[in-house]
Image: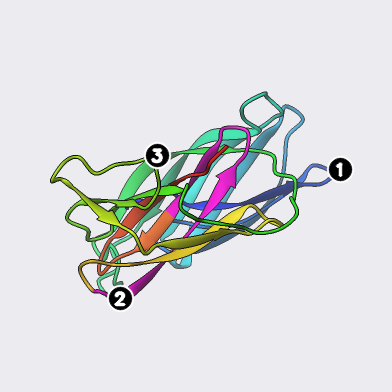
Amino acid sequence: PGGDGFGEITVDAAGRVKFAGELPDGTAVRHEAFMGRSGLWPLHVPLAGGRGMLLGWITVTNQSRLDAFGEVIWHKPLSPQDRYYPSGFSTRRHLFGSAYAPVGGATTGGRDTAGMLSGGNLDKIILGAGGALTAASPAFETLQNFRWQLRPETGFVEGTFTHPATRQETAFRGAFLPKVGWTSGYFLGQSRSGVVQLHLPQ
């Protein structure tokens, strides 16, 4: 699947880790575990009634650039009735996280914010309005009518754009990681998911 999943990790004084998020095919995930003394968090989320899984060892730390990182295995079983990826898959993904402190006031995308979308049944890379990106190649298509908002209490991002294939308003969701200056997420097309990346002005 294209796109970046996202979520929120919280750790209490007893070392209990709670995770709530979304995978980039739209699957909601919830998980609780205890972190080891070395900062290792055993991530294991059964999916599809136990036939699938999200599995990995995540290091929770306080580095200058990252506060969580690790590799996870994501397995989705054969599910012919599913709209997205009915044939199933097994893939490895990198997980990385950044500490987030709530900020005041919502941030909304405007003229100086650029976005890039690909996958999700798009036949080209789509660039949102903004001075940071230009469409100099026929492989790109510009898109002026995309909107997004950063939720200050969580660091999550949500927005919409008009999908060129369906001409319908399509939602996307993601997260802002302050330490690495990274904002990305996913959207769902007709049968596949895609990635959305935002360039926030500094």
The tag on residue 168 is 2
Q: Is residue 82 found inside the magenta-colored segment of the image? A: no
User: What SS does tag 3 mark?
Assistant: loop
Query: Do tag 1 and tag 2 residues touch (Cβ < 8 Å)?
Result: no
| Distance from the alpha carbon under mark 3 to that under mark 1 | 42 Å
Label 1 sits on a secondary structure element that is loop
Residue 18 in view, yes or no: yes
In the depicted view, which residue is nearer to us: 23 or 180? 180
Q: Position of residue 8 (x, y in %)?
A: 64, 52
Q: Distance from label 2 to label 3 (Cα)?
A: 26 Å
Q: Residue at x 71, y 58 (%)?
A: 105
Examine the residues drawn in magenta and state their main secondary structure.
strand
Residue occupied by mark 1: 13
Query: Mark 3 against mark 1, which lies toward the viewer?
Result: 3
Q: Give the structural element (helix, strand or loop) at label 2.
A: loop
N-terminal of the two: label 2 or label 3? 3
Q: Is residue 171 left or right of residue 166?
A: right
Please, what is the three-letter code of the amino acid marked with disc 2? Answer: Gln
Q: Position of residue 143 (x, y in %)?
A: 30, 58
**Figure check: 3 above or below 93:** below
Residue at the limit of the structure toward the top, as seen here: 64
Q: Amino acid at mark 3?
A: Ala
The foreground one among 143 and 35 is 143
Task: Say above or below: 30 vs 33.
Answer: below
Residue 183 part of the magenta segment: yes
Image: magenta residue range = 167-185
Marks 1 and 2 sit apart, C-alpha to C-alpha, by 46 Å
Residue ID at (64%, 52%):
155
Residue 202: x %, y % from top left: 58, 37
The residue wearing badge 3 is: 132
In the picture as drawn, the residue positioned furthest to the right comes out as: 13
- Crowding at mark 3 (Cα within 10 Å: few <14, some 14-19, many 20+): some
